Amino acid sequence: MLGEFDLIRAILSDNCKHRDLVIPNGDDAAVLRCGGQLVAVSVDTIVEGSHFSLDYFTPRQIGIKGLESSLSDIVAVGGRPEFALVSVTVSKREDFAKAEDIYAGIRDASARCGVIVIGGDTTVGGDSLSLSVTSIGRIPSDEWITPRSGARVGDQIYVTGALGGSAAGLHLFTAKIAGFERLRLKHLEPKCRVDLANSIGLIATSMIDISDGLSSELYHICEASKVGCVVYEDRLPIDLDTRELAAKSDLDPFRWAWNGGEDYELLFTCEPKDAAVAPGTLIGEVTEERVVLVERGGTREKLVRGGYDHFRRGEELKA
Amino acid sequence: MLGEFDLIRAILSDNCKHRDLVIPNGDDAAVLRCGGQLVAVSVDTIVEGSHFSLDYFTPRQIGIKGLESSLSDIVAVGGRPEFALVSVTVSKREDFAKAEDIYAGIRDASARCGVIVIGGDTTVGGDSLSLSVTSIGRIPSDEWITPRSGARVGDQIYVTGALGGSAAGLHLFTAKIAGFERLRLKHLEPKCRVDLANSIGLIATSMIDISDGLSSELYHICEASKVGCVVYEDRLPIDLDTRELAAKSDLDPFRWAWNGGEDYELLFTCEPKDAAVAPGTLIGEVTEERVVLVERGGTREKLVRGGYDHFRRGEELKA
């Protein structure tokens, strides 16, 4: 995606300090201190062709996906999402009814998550549909903040829910396979883990939402925390539907789990003493050696940092 | 613009109450109460073809316009803009250098306004360039909030700066007229009135920024405040360059002043006792009779609610 992180870093390099800025840009959400409260803010844009296709998304589902994916960023820093601002751009060829349906999806998802839409705008222009959602939430106190940089050597690594379902759902559309309705909805109507917003922040030392795929999120955590990790492939939570579809399609379900984006589950670390209350599956440990390792079949190797739809070789951690 | 206000109203109708929501959606910015502080938030999206043309805007100027127009909304509710999140979508045909130049403009404008960019994303997709900016600021206390609904019968009506300059600048491009560099920059590099953020909120009873044109902003204020007004056309502040270009083009400069958008000056009301410190030009009074009147040449008539580029007949105030 065009060196996004480098670009954002460039605008921040000479301009990123403020006494009320607790977590700056670069994490899932920025965190501000406002009169004794902690406010988390994030923006997320989804664009036709890049993040969704009108071939299989309904306008209502675009609204749902836009809102849930943005709220997920607030949950990922330990906050509870409370408010959203939505900016919808409809191309000239879109009709009024389509925009109304997008707003219906936004309304449905905001009701599910207990969020109020407090602003936004609608623009007609361009040739693509896009939706930009700004999410705002509050974090109870400093101990609840879960920055990417908080992982410590000896911490355990967990993921919530099951992985790869959204990628499996997308495969149903691209390979034109019938059935598996639940997986289809995993892709079309993702649900962020707002249900964990009131519990996970208290035990997690670091956290990130899985929007780009587990493997790259592990790299993000390790780079920000200046640690390494080892993850056990056979522990990755993959549900039966996803395994069944993979078997039927002669594909590797672990590939979806490692590199399938948009599951919007949470990847977090916590101290071993909190294992009993950690709401997820234990998949690995944080290590001092600064390398991201995967153990499969009794041997360890560098984990390939995958993306949503591309593969690269195992690589070095960035400074 | 596609019934924007009706659409936004639709998503809010069943979902707009929260104990910490001081000013809901529908004003220039939403205002939240956070731990004893007042936080104003707004989002503004500009799209190639609708809000700017790459024929005469440089990428840097697109960044400037996107940031300044969004920060203006914070100033308009009585706040001082402090933080911004920027979401840039570049079409597939745009190159990396163009995105970098947009960020350079964002950096320049944020430095001018004393604002920090705390988040954002960059997306490649679609066929149009667009920029969505979320602005965040704080308001010193409740008395500083300047909602659209605060105008009272007997208040005076003021505008800051000069009007019509941006429309005059646009005319230079569309009519291919040379010279008038200052007007050209009024259109390409607008400056929001962040310089007034620390003074105007204390005296203004209501305020709005002039993004769509003075005439429609007057209607917004009167509708929200449930009042009417009379405005004196010969008092509208129009600078010499704008008058000169109008004369040269055989056009009416008042047309630009009434209906030219994107001046990002402020329209505000205040009590007559504050006249000595009001930072602008007195153009009219708030009246009990619920109609928006313009006085020109000694006679009064209903003001035409214009838009940026279209004209309609004088109309009734909405309930």
Image: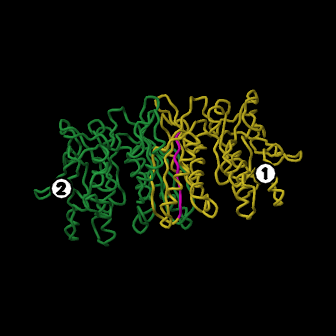
Chain colours: A yellow, B green
Quarter holding the N terminus of chain B is bottom left
- What are the residue bounds of the magenta stretch? A128-136
Q: Is residue B277 left or right of residue B128?
A: left
Q: Is residue A30 left or right of residue B24?
A: right
Which kind of residue does numbered mark 2 sit on? Glu
| Relative image position of residue A310 (x, y in whole percent) | 71, 59
Label 2 close to label 1 by CB (< 8 Å): no
**Chain on which label 2 sits:** B
| Relative image position of residue B227 (x, y in whole percent) | 25, 44
Work out whether residue B62 or residue B125 is closer to the camera in this orientation and state it.
B125
Note whether residue B264 is visible: yes
Q: Residue furthest bottom?
A: B176
Note whether residue B241 is visible: no
Residue shown at the point (19%, 68%) measured from the top left: B247
Work out whether residue B86 or residue B59 is closer to the camera in this orientation and state it.
B86
Question: What SS does tag 2 mark?
Answer: helix
**Chain on which label 1 sits:** A
Residue A167 disc label: none
Q: Is residue A228 magenta?
A: no
Dot 2 alpha-carbon crowd within 10 angstroms: few under 14, some 14 to 19, many 20 or more: some
Q: Are marks 2 and 1 on the same chain?
A: no
Q: Nearer the viewer, mark 2 or mark 1?
A: 1
In the figure, residue B225 lies in which quadrant? Answer: top left
Q: Is residue B114 left or right of residue A285?
A: left
Provide the residue designation for mark 1.
Answer: A241
Dot 1 alpha-carbon crowd within 10 angstroms: few under 14, some 14 to 19, many 20 or more: some
Q: Is residue A131 magenta?
A: yes
Provide the residue designation for mark 2.
Answer: B233
